[in-house]
Image (cartoon, rainbow, N blue to C red):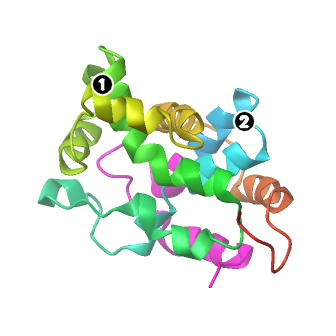
Amino acid sequence: MALAFDDIALLFARHGNTQYSGEPVTQTEHALQTAWFAEQEGADDELVTAALLHDLGHLLHDHGETPTERGIDDLHQFAALPFLRGLFGERVLDAIRWHVDAKRYLCATRPAYHAALSADSQRSLVLQGGVFTPEQAQAFIARPHADEAVRLRLWDDRAKVEGLATPELSHYLARARRCALPAGGSAA
């Protein structure tokens, strides 16, 4: 069953104030900053929505503030998908689904990328399977919407700025409503 927009807002209200995995921002601040960076680069409603909701799976888990410190990969990139399917199309879902693999891809294809990751992102990379081999990187980038997942990943990496002013959640949920599937629509 798909979440409604009120459900998404409620998840952020209830769990969004938790610290974002050892970073100087909360889960909500991270989501808003990721969406803001997407918006600043002219991304359309679907990519801004994917940016906003890419870590929604973290809000569905109760692992504490930094699961990677305890050796846990919470598979957050998959956790929210069943709840978002039926609400958004595959472009939004694929960007969310592939944003962790996009980190693995970027580490394999951009030599300076790995060193620029935060400590928690480097720790989670190991738990998430590590850097892609050249063959894995090639297979990844051939997936539908993988290039958009890479864009999302780059916004995600930047979205850890303490005190950065962004529009409110309601602004981004309004954009999300514009790209939502019609009631009873198909995600294909």
Residue drawn at 13 percent across, 58 percent down: 71
Q: Nearer the viewer, residue 109 or 125?
A: 109
Residue drawn at 35 percent across, 20 percent down: 109
Quadrant in which residue 77 is drawn: bottom left
Total numbered circles: 2
Secondary structure under badge 1?
Answer: helix
Quadrant in which residue 76 is drawn: bottom left
> Please, what is the three-letter code of the amino acid marked with disc 1?
Ala
Name the residue carrying label 1.
Answer: 108
Residue drawn at 27 percent across, 68 percent down: 64
Direction from residue 177 to residue 119 in the image, left or right: left
Q: Where residue 97 sits in the image (x, y, percent)? A: 49, 54
Q: Residues within 10 Å of mark 2 (few under 14, many from 20)?
A: some
Q: Where residue 106 sits in the image (x, y, percent)? A: 38, 27
Q: Nearer the viewer, residue 161 or 52?
A: 52
The magenta region covers 1-30
- Report the residue that reaches farthest toward the left: 70
Residue drawn at 86 percent across, 57 percent down: 178
